[in-house]
Image (tube, coloured by chain):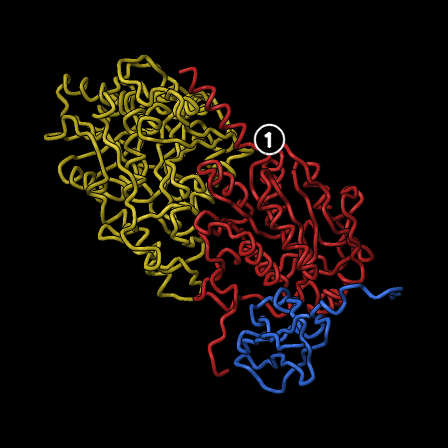
Amino acid sequence: MKAKRGREVLTGEHFWQGDYACAEGAIAAGCRFFAGYPITPATEIAETMARRLPEVGGVYVQMEDELGSMAAVIGASYAGLKAMTATSGPGFSLMQENIGLAAMTETPCVVVDIMRGGPSTGQPTKPGQQDVMQAKWGSHGDYEIIALTPSSVQEMFDLTVEAFNLSEIYRVPVFVMADEVVAHMWERVTIPSQDKIQIATREKPKASPGEYAPFQPNKNLVPPMANFGEGYHFYATGLTHDETGHPQTSSAEAQQKLVHRLCDKIRKNAGKIIRVQKTLLDDADVAVVAYGITSRAALSAVRDARREGINAGLLRLITLWPFPETHVSELAKQADAILVPEMNYGQLVREVERAAKATEVTLLSKLGEDPHKPTEILDAIRRTHR
Amino acid sequence: MSEELVHPLEGFLRKEMIPHIWCEGCGNGIILNSYVRALDELDLNLDKVVTVSGIGCIGRLSGYTNTDSFHTTHGRAIAFATGVKLANPELKVVVISGDGDLFAIGGNHFIHAARRNVDLQVICANNFNYGMTGGQYGPTTPREAWTTTTPYGNIEHPFNLVHLAAASGAVYVARWTTIHVRRLKEAIKKALQKDGFSFIEVVTPCPEIFGRYNKMRTGLDMMNWFRRVSEIRNHSDPAKAEITPERIVLGEFVDEEKPTYGQLLRNMISKVQEKQ
Amino acid sequence: MSVRLWRKPLDADKIQVPRGEVHIIADRCKGCRLCIEFCPKDVLEESDELNKRGVHPPKVKSDATCILCGFCEAICPDFAIYTTEKPREEGG
């Protein structure tokens, strides 16, 4: 297509809702394939992609359901395009089997889950953070994924770009887990010029077609990836397989080797993947561990607490999975108490408890309404401090 | 054997995977044979062919063909193939899967891909049951057939697959059995050269399981049954072509032209880009 | 239903029926007998040998006249049989 191309990166200042920023982040990262199904509150991502992808020569296809959407995303990625889908809880559940296929076949792809109240149909227009465990454990079997949680519209752009980069580097599905508030609120977004945006693309094989083994890892435990149509005639399957891709359904050794590598490529590289933001933590007695929109209220509460003389601090999780356990366990050695506000009935708090060991961890749960108010978190900080 | 015998189609097979897992007399091997024979006679660039299969005995086929191949989750082969074809329209994407994979769990993806007229070639190995899991009934199991989950006889009406495909919008619909090897190969060649959603139903024996449960103990018995009851009627009405124990209507049912999803998509993208 | 030819085709003596040679990759055979049963010239029969699978692969009968129709090659599910053209002798 030699026609004049639409702008791929909308450099400049904008006033957008989170979903728009997410879609623009994807396009800026090089995403040229979106397969999805409308679902509140992620529909705006699909609508933006339907409008913008043809402008940049990309493909938007609205599949008949979320199962087909995830399958099409894997197909497009294997055919060489950066591919994504966007959904919410009920669609996320439908996608899980093929998320497992993506993990097993080491398919680079991005799945955005705009979290709403669940379970089941739940409260489609109300925020939640009820899918955070599902991002890690949603599909059957042992596998590792990467999940990022934006807490602002700017991060909806930035972290979507990062999600694509991580998915290409580690050949793994990467999730952008945003609550409905971050997805639907309107804020300023600054988009830099295209040359300032770092993009990563999957490593291509150096081996010739005769020698290429599609799942032979490099030193980072990630196999270089050939695309369909490049002459490699390779085979990929969801069955347990060896480096050549051929099924090994009876070998215990093959199962161990593959499962270990699929998990280790994330676990052993966790130090390079994990990002957190620390505020006022150096001398904190009460630490708040929060993510998403909750972290914005928590920041306000922590500052107010400091004004009252309480040594409070905030550990904001940008990466949810792999879970930043080292950061939490270090924090637990120094703080007397850890507070975890979440818009669910206790999910990530379990990971915090696990990493914090003996240090007291308290859940501050909020369901069904607006996000936590700073005063609610401040009250909890005061109570914990006493 | 004193000298090394090399089958003429050896280059189309993944040597490390042969012999395949299919039972003696199973028609899946004949479908594989017809498929690679069609690829050979068309002299297609094998680098640009992608073979996609789902779950089931026939699902192992992609593992035996020396092309870029992918073995998907159950029922999702067509959705996966849609992603591949739309992402790279230069690729020839062939889906070869079973009656359960394409029409039970995968039914929704089949009808929508046909409706959209995505340029895919879909070959269905219809052996009337779920063979891989030991012979349960599926959407094409004949009435009163014995399967492990219909121990009192199947009470469900089966699909008429060619009717379903035609009604969903496929531009090429044909049905052959594994004994009609030449016509099957010609149909595959025609489908590969035709733009749009092509569907070929291949009625195939499952001797170890479906056949054995239903008084056709060997592949030969089932193939003789095909030979006895097949009627070739090209261009007949697919709605009247249900398979019964007394009659299997074969031939081409639909052969028409319609813009494909890919063509319409690319036209739309060109128009949008011109306005930028 | 047999066809009664009411005249001999004018180029009947120019038609040469091809002669084929059958090659059997014995260890691939699974003994389905499709080639034996469906050969139009009844060229094949079950051999007495056993291959690696404990199956009797087919063998070409001593008085066989394979006409290179290629059906066995096309119907074999296991890529265990194929035919090549026998070089034509003069006046054959």
The residue indicated by pointer 1 is B259
Q: Colour of chain A?
A: yellow
Residue A368 appears in the rendering: no
Q: Position of residue B204 (x, y in %)?
A: 67, 59
Q: Is residue B157 left or right of residue A9?
A: right
Q: Quadrant of residue B183?
A: bottom right
The foreground one among A380 and C15 is C15
Residue reaching furthest to the bottom: C48
- Taking depth in this image into account, of B86 and A23 the one nearest to the observer is B86
Q: Position of residue B187 (x, y in %)?
A: 65, 50
* Colour that chain B carries in the picture: red
Q: Position of residue A326 (x, y in %)?
A: 19, 42
Q: Is residue A43 left or right of residue B209?
A: left
Q: Nearer the viewer, residue A122 or A287?
A: A122
Q: Secondary structure at mark 1?
A: loop
Image height of A304 relative to A205, above or below: above
Chain C image colour: blue
- The amino acid pointed to by label 1 is Pro
Residue at x 23%, y 27% (from the top left corner): A197
